[in-house]
Structure formats: C-alpha cells, structure tokens
Amino acid sequence: MIDADPRSASADAQTPRLSQELSEFLVELSVAMHKHAIYPHGHPLLTQSVEAVHDSLIRLLVERPALSIGVARRQLIIEGVATGALHPLLSELAGKLHRHHIGALKFLRGISRDELASALERVGIEAQRDEKPLGMQPEILDSLWVNVKLFPLTYDRLELLDEEEAADEDGSARPPGGRDTRAAQLWVGLARAAIASEQGRSQSDGELEPEHVAKAIDDHDREPAYDQVIVGYLLQIAHEVRHDDTQVQASAGLKRRISKLVGSLQPATLRRLLDMGGDTLQRRKFVLDAAQGMNVDAVVELVQAAANAEGQTISHSLVRMLTKLATHAAQDTGRRGNMADEEFREHVERLVSSWSLDDPNPLAYSAALEHMSRADPATAPDEAQFPCEPARVILMALELGVTGDAVTRALTASLARGQLAELLDVLDTAPPGREEISSQLWTVIAAADPLGALLVAPKLDHQLIRRVAMRLGAAGAPALVRAVIVLPSGAHHDRLIATLISLGADAAPAVAAQLASAAPPIVCELLAGLKSMAPAKLPGEARSFLAHGDAAVRREAARLLLSYEETRDAAMLVAVRDDDACVVAAGLQAAQERCPPLVASTIRLRVDRGEITESAALVAAVRAVAGVSDEQSVEWLVRRTMTTGGLLRRPRLTPTSPEMLAALNVLAARWGSDSRATPALELARSSTSATVRAAVRGERLTMRTEAIK
C-alpha cells in the first residue's frame, strides 16, 4: 500500500491508505509513462506497458464510470488519498505531470488501448523538450482524446503566495531557504487547483485571497477530477496545521488561510467535498485534524458538514453551545478565551469520535426502543411488531383456525427471510379440519409470487421449485415456461422441463401460448412436452408449427399433430409432402395405421418421382398404400414387384429388395385372387429364393423391412 503521508504513517496507524489495486495501477502508469519517454515509438516494451496499464484500468472502471487523479508537485491524489511524497515512481510521475502544467487527469470507461498509448506517448515527453507544456495549450486538450481528459493549471501571479508566506508575522523577511516550506507549497497547490478553470485571464492580487479561492470552488461545474484535487489538498493541509511544529510561522499562515477558505465556502460545496473525501474513517480523521488546527469558526462549519455527510443529526442546542464556545474562544484573548478554545476543541473531538460508535445495546433492545419512539406503531418494522417467530404465529393460526393481519404479516416476514420451505412444511402438516385455513394461507403465499422468486435465484432449488409448482398447478406454468426459454440448456433446463410436464394437461394452454416467443430448440422441447402432457384438446397455437422453417420443429409438430384425431389426416398429408426425411417418416408411420386416399395418392406419386428413396421409407410407403383398396393401389403394388426384360420381354420379378418383398407380402395377403396380382404371385412362388417364397406364403417378414417406426 502507499501511505497518504509518509511522515505521519508511523505516528497515526489510521492514516487512510490506497487500495492495493489503485496502488498497483499508479505504479504501472508511472512505469509506462517513463518507458514512453526513453524508448522510440513502436518498441515492444511500450506495447507491453500499455497492455498492463489498460488491463488494470479496465478492472478499475468496472465499478466506476471514471477514474480521476489529482496532481500536486510531488504527489498524486486519487479517491481522496494523497500518495507519499517520497515514493520514487509516483513522485516522478507527479513531477512530470506538474511540469506539463496538468492539475488533474481523468480516464473514462470505454478507453481503448490505442487511445491510452497515444496519451502516454504525448504526456511522456518531458515538458522542456516540447515547444510548450500541454497545460498551456488549452485549445487542443479537449480535441486530443475522447476518453482521456487533461485539466490544466495556471501559474500567473501565484508565486506571490510564496513570497507572502516567506515573510514573518511581523513583516521581516525570512532567509531564502525558508521560502520553500511545505505549508506554502500546499496553499499554492490548492490555489492553483481552485482557479484552474479560470486560466487565460490575468489575476489581480485580491483574487489570490482565500475568499476568491472559495468562490472559484463554489462556482465550479462539479467535475469529479477537479474535486479530487481540492479534497486531496484539504486532507494534507488539515494534517499539516495539526502535526507540523517545525515551521510554526508558515503553519500559522496556512491555518489562517485555510480557516478563512472553509468559512467562505457554501455549505453545499463543503458537504460535497467531504462526500468526495473517502470513507468514514478518513472523513473523521480530517475533521479531527481540523478541530485541533483550524480556527474555531471553520471547525463549526466542518462539523456540521461532516455530520450531514455521514447521516448524523446534531441538535440545535448542541450547535448553539459549540457556537457560543467558539465565539468566546475567538473574542477573548485572555485565560477565559484559552479555556473556551480548549473546551471547544475537546467537545468537537468527543462528538466526532463518538457519533460513529457501535450501539452498545442488544439488537432486540434497540429495536424495542425504536418501536416505542414512533408515534404511529403501524409504521414500525415487522421484526419490532412481531418478536415471536413468524413460523410460530402461523402454527398457532392453523391450530386455532383463525386468520388476520397478524398472520398475513407473519407470512410476509417468513417469505422475506427465505423460509418458504418451512412454510410449505407447516401447511403440509396442518391439523385435520383446517384445510380452509391452510388454503387461505397458501393464497397469501401465492400472491407473493414465490415461484418467480425461486426461478430467478442465483442457485435453483429444484425440489422446492417442484413443490411450489405442484401446489400452483397450471397457474405456475407461465413462470416455468419463461424460465425454460431464458435458461440455457443443461441439467437445470432439463429438470425445469420435467417439472413443467408434471403439471399435466391443464398446463398445456400456458405452454402453447409461449411457443411463438421461443427459439427453435426450445420450441422442439415444448412441443415434445405438450405431447407428454396429452391434453384432451390440442391448443390451436401448436398447429401452425408443421409449416415452420426449422426441420426439427416440424418433426416435433408432426408427432404431436398426428397423435390427435382432429388433426391427424391434415397433418399426415402435410408430413408426407415435406422435404425432411424424418417428417416424411412420421407421416408414413401414421399412414400405415389408416391411410386416406389423398395421402396414398401423394405417397405413390413421390415414390414414382424418386423423392422417397430410403429403403425403410419405401417399405412404409408400400404398407401405407396397401391400406387403400382401389385399383390404383393394386396396380402400383404390382409394378413394385414385376417388370419385363430379356430379348422376349417376358414378365419377371424385380430385383429382391425390402420394398419388393413387402409388396409381395401385402399382395398375397389382400389380393391373392385378383387377376392383376396373380402373375407376380405365381412368379414369386416358383422363385429359387426362399425369402421371396416366404413373402407370398403370407408370412409377416421380420427383417429390416420393418425398421421404420
């Protein structure tokens, strides 16, 4: 970690420190900028350094819209914490930016590697090597990069502050070596940062006073990078005026200026700066340092602003007492004034230290006190109104057979605690004769949408989801279908589908209603689920999917529609006309049981055109056509078994195949005495093939001719 102030790190163990990730980012930024200053453009080491800084920056910007860094002469200020002035890498980085007259820089979310590399290359060049420092070229700063912002500082006339601090209180000049005190540097840095937005305009001597600095801070447009710099200087100055005894006169001048500055700031501005100043520990330390080092009037302003920032309330009586003590301390220079000053600062320190203490009372006791302090008990939290466990209240309601607002609130409290499983156990074990009360309690639970909450939980409890879904019945189907649509395929997905199917036929309309909004793979699963649910009447939304553009969807739709009598014939005709072999197979399978004449005609036509070529499909087509007793079917079957050939063009059997054997089998079984079938059957009976002879003997073949199912 990087100390906010290395000189006080050992003296104050609670000095705010930067987080590890911010410390590492600043070091990587310093190293990358140093490499851009010494290596030529395109060097491999530059690419590596930019990658390291960019990766760290992207991680930091995940939780922040922007990252602002303030610049002092030898320090950087980030998230209200100043880096150590003695840190070699960070002090070098601060100095380089300072020489460029840059008071702050900000990185925005969305910054690219190229943009970062360009900024590092431009800023990495030492200011004295360039024609003019970047901060003195405001006309180009806004146009350089989109997601990197540089904020310039001005130096005109600000050196007067150094000269003024170089004089003693009595007006005599100090030796030149005392001019560059830390107190003077801090105030000069703060003044530069405060009037950064007014560059390009000459300043008069009066504009360098604390009142003008305060006005510049009040009037600023609330740029976070600007606030970072101001907060960082305020934290350092508060520490300086309390702890630095080596430069008494310089610290006294700094104390006078910072006190006047704080007193001149608007209350809203002061609250904003304290909010920017980090966490509660850092804010409290700042106020404690100010309480011992600043003038009493400024301390009162800071205490009230800090209380507002931390959500604390200071009574009007206490404010009046502190103000009275501050007035005595400021006006009376004698013994009474000193006592008032000591008492004032002691009270402030005790107040700030104690308002963040943990409540020493037990939680239940504090809740009871909070409940009693309220004028309207109806607004008290549930825990205060129901010290008895909610589950016990519900058990008592079931045993006594009563309901009411108390029971409803107990149910709500149990659900808020995540005790749904326990509530279901209570309802499942309700005493005999309490079914009506149990039903009323379940109605209250169902109104809270417990299934919806379970389905969006980070970890799905499938056992509990199934219990709730079975209680809800068809009412729980819409939520389950939505979860199935959103959840990616996997074990959780399959278990939700199983739960959905277990709801039965009553849930089918809810499933069908969601088909249009689902992706094709989900539609397939939902159509298969509808078939398993087997509703008495098929929902109308499922009928259109037999014409879907995805073949897998058409397969499931065909299987579903062919299982219902009212849609069977129409679905069969569409299926045997389909281009997908699996859809055709489903239609042929259904046609073997009962084949309408129009379907048989379509099958014969597609076989003759060579559009159905698979052996199993041809066998199914033969058996489907055989179910229609018309002349076209007999003649078509004969053509599948007999042809003419040779020099004399004599009739003979077609080559042995599964579909030829199936045609002989059905001809012998149904048209054995038909004159049109006799020639083919006679040839088969005299065949040398035992398989052919077996086919015409009426034996049901069990070879792969029956493979289509």
Image (cartoon, grey):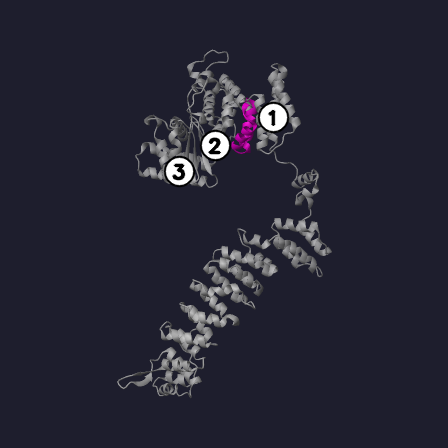
What x and y, as percent, mark residue 181? 45, 19
Badges 2 and 1: C-beta atoms under 8 Å apart? no
Q: Which residues are magenta?
A: 264-293
Choose top left, top right, bottom left or bottom right for residue 698.
bottom left
Q: Is residue 209 above or below residue 468?
A: above
Foreground pick, 49 / 573: 573
Camera sees residue 295: yes
Which residue is painted at 45% across and 39% down in the image?
A: 60
Q: Of callouts 2 and 3, which one flags the residue occurring earlier in the amino acid sequence?
A: 3
CA separation, marks 2 and 3? 24 Å
Which residue is painted at 69% across and 47% down in the image?
A: 388
Label 3 SS: helix
Foreground pick, 568 / 255: 568
Residue wearing tag 1: 348
Three-letter code, disc 2? Glu
Three-letter code, disc 1? Val
What x and y, as percent, mark residue 81? 48, 31
Which residue is painted at 55% across and 33% down in the image?
A: 280
Three-letter code, disc 3? Val
